[in-house]
Image (cartoon, coloured by chain):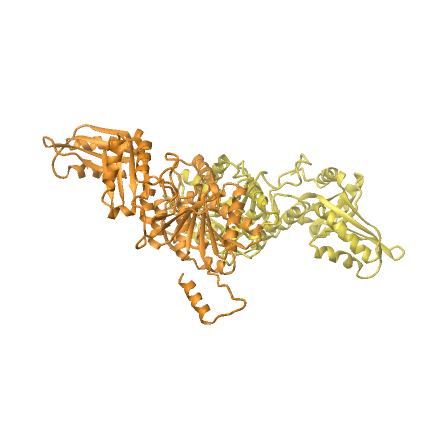
Chain colours: A orange, B yellow
Amino acid sequence: MNDCAAVDRETAKSPRPFNVQVHTIVATIVQKFGGTSVGTIERIKAVAARAVRTKLAGNRVVVVVSAMAGETNRLLGLAGEISTHPHHREIDVLISSGEQVSIGLVALAICELGHEARSFLGHQVRITTDDSHGMARIQDIDASAVHDALDAGNIVVVAGFQGTNAAGQITTLGRGGSDLSAVAMAAALKADSCEIYTDVDGIYTTDPRICSDARKIERITFQEMLELASLGAKVLQTRSVEFAMKYGVPLHVRSSWEESEGSWVVPEEEGMEGAVVTGIAYDRKMAKITVDAVPDKPGMVGGLLQPLGAAGINVDVIIQNSSVKNQTAVSFTIASNEAERATKLAREVAAGLGCGEVTCDTRVAKVSVVGAGMRSEPGVAVKMFETLGQAGVNIQMIATSEIRISCLIGERYTELAVRELHDAFGLATE
Amino acid sequence: MNDCAAVDRETAKSPRPFNVQVHTIVATIVQKFGGTSVGTIERIKAVAARAVRTKLAGNRVVVVVSAMAGETNRLLGLAGEISTHPHHREIDVLISSGEQVSIGLVALAICELGHEARSFLGHQVRITTDDSHGMARIQDIDASAVHDALDAGNIVVVAGFQGTNAAGQITTLGRGGSDLSAVAMAAALKADSCEIYTDVDGIYTTDPRICSDARKIERITFQEMLELASLGAKVLQTRSVEFAMKYGVPLHVRSSWEESEGSWVVPEEEGMEGAVVTGIAYDRKMAKITVDAVPDKPGMVGGLLQPLGAAGINVDVIIQNSSVKNQTAVSFTIASNEAERATKLAREVAAGLGCGEVTCDTRVAKVSVVGAGMRSEPGVAVKMFETLGQAGVNIQMIATSEIRISCLIGERYTELAVRELHDAFGLATE
């Protein structure tokens, strides 16, 4: 925008009545396509066509791609036939070949459309990571070779999901790694935006499968997106949003199949006129463990939970009932796939500490109301509790952050709660 | 062998009556496995087991592998759906992923057997080539990283067929490239031998499908192998044998499925007691073009053949009939898949030079007798011509090198000629 203003002033100073030169502002755009978006040759051609259109509109274009849908699982299946506990370093060598196939094919498809394309593997970019094979963290990106290729007129095609450690060995970034590659490339290139192409056309106020009048969100802050992502909205991985927030890379989540604008995830701006509540998230993959008859003395809750943390079990919401006869009850939530292990461990610990019975309830869900505007709007929590109460939904636990209020409820009430809250906060209307 | 002798002298000088220490001579062995040998998970496990056995026998082991059988064609098929004239550089990115899958799986299989393995891609070795994507030539191998990995106790698994150019882009070595990778690795590592594992258990005195009493050759010189390879024996590519000869790397061609010794391809040694004739080769993929009524004046043959060479058509054997009425006929052979193009071109050129009719005969074959011993044995050619004559096989053209005599014959006589020659030179008996 500053460049624009400068051009305007320049034009005003020395007016050229004839053949006024149009100064095009060249933007750098990173476009990320997941496995489904490059899952067939037809779709790969569509990806190439979109990249070419973006370039013809005057942009520098970097395409980041995942492996073709199903390929990573096929390769892991082969490894599984060889070893039940395969070597992480060699697994990374194996599965990173999937993205290599994708970049070759996308580059070929761009060339076939008459444009120059140049593919880059992780080590060619180069994307440097730590040594944690299978879940490596990006440490540095030297984007100079990519800049050179862009300056030479190429559309650059980068293999997502992969990097290289200091010793030159291939690493992979783990779940959601290609999103992270795209955001990191955008940050390194100081790109104007990072477009994340998905099966859906944007981020919705809630799950459209539950709430038919869910509305596409035009703009959402990184903080709000983080709360929605970690609460079960699967469009963007938390790591990618955190990375984009840290480096201020605007994300544009949009459909691989349509041309329409999607949803923008952006830094919070001063005076941003946002709705008080932006979206309703839910998570059914919860379990609640309750420990009865916990002696009411200092250190008991810590004593109960420390062994779970040491075992790598992440505890989410915790409540402690008020004390009766010097005994209390402690409840906490965990991911449902940890329920069995956590219950067994909690029983051992509880017995050691002289606590009572340990029960586990997997028929629970968490519904959350998210909105940056609720910081300055105190009535949101009350309205949430009232709405759930009027619908006959009992609230078992409550947790809050600055921009989120979450309630644990019975799992069978999930759809009802989401619909009532979506309606109560007026999210369906523009 | 020198080291062996040194150890023996050492032992003799200072005899140790008790607990005599056994000096194991550590050899470095490169083992190359083609696509069929790594075509299934079971076969990959067999490759790993063989590498481990070789290591347990006290050797340093480098395994070079091709893509799993069918994989390169699958990838080229995908590229073919995108482009009919795909970009060579991006094709190399695409197809080199096949070897990446193989090295990952072989390394995993070795680890599963409880041994350390470390995979290397072409750029990790690093194998530097020129820029000729799809048919790159190896310029240099820096084997220091591989040496380090071997020193650390690893079995090293190297991706065949691929290298990297000076700009860090992936290149591939073309047909037979994995053999070449293995031989070049062996040369760079100063390995004691390079084992080429194939579907057959060695190099035979002729094609066993034609001659049931064909015999496996124990030792053959590089020069003999070159004559056999270029004449249609498909076990080893010419480029690999040339490379091995240049760097003196002994090749051991042996079966992927059996433990028995195969055939050794070695430098010619002083006083090597070889058979006069080592093998009989044949090639059916020949075509003979004859140009009639060629004016018998200087430069005519060159004028006929130069345009073919310029068009990339390789001319093999050439004969010119004796002149009658200042006219002669010129015949030459080419690969049969070039027959149509070459005939068309020869007709244009012949017309321009005032020559007569141009005919092409694709029903021809070349049979060759090969043997380093024939240098000092003048009777081989006569015996070959007599043998063919007695069998009623007409010789159309003759070509010779120092260690080879080739005859062009009618294609339908191929099997007959091969069998009669194999018998006449006593190749079936030890």
Q: Quadrant of residue A369?
A: top left
- Residue B239 at x, y percent in the picture: 60, 51
Residue at the spot x=66%, y=46% of the render?
B228
Residue at the spot x=73%, y=47% of the render?
B339
Looking at the picture, tell me which residue is in the foreground, B271 or A274. Answer: A274
The quadrant of the picture occupied by the C terminus of chain A is top left
The quadrant of the picture occupied by the N terminus of chain A is bottom left
- Residue A397 at x, y percent in the picture: 23, 35
| Above or below, comparing residue A176 to residue B165 in the picture | above
| Above or below, comparing residue B88 to residue A332 in the picture | below
| Above or below, comparing residue A13 to residue B131 in the picture | below
- Residue A345 at x, y percent in the picture: 24, 33
| Above or below, comparing residue A56 to residue B411 in the picture | below
- Residue B234 at x, y percent in the picture: 63, 43
Q: Is residue A242 visible?
A: yes
Q: Is residue B139 left or right of residue B298?
A: left
Looking at the picture, tell me which residue is in the foreground, A213 or A169. Answer: A213
Looking at the picture, tell me which residue is in the foreground, B55 or B348. Answer: B348
Q: Farthest left residue?
A: A325
Q: How many marks?
A: 0
Q: Is residue B233 left or right of residue A186?
A: right
Q: Is residue B85 left or right of residue B32?
A: right
Q: Is residue A342 visible?
A: no
Q: Farthest right residue?
A: B325
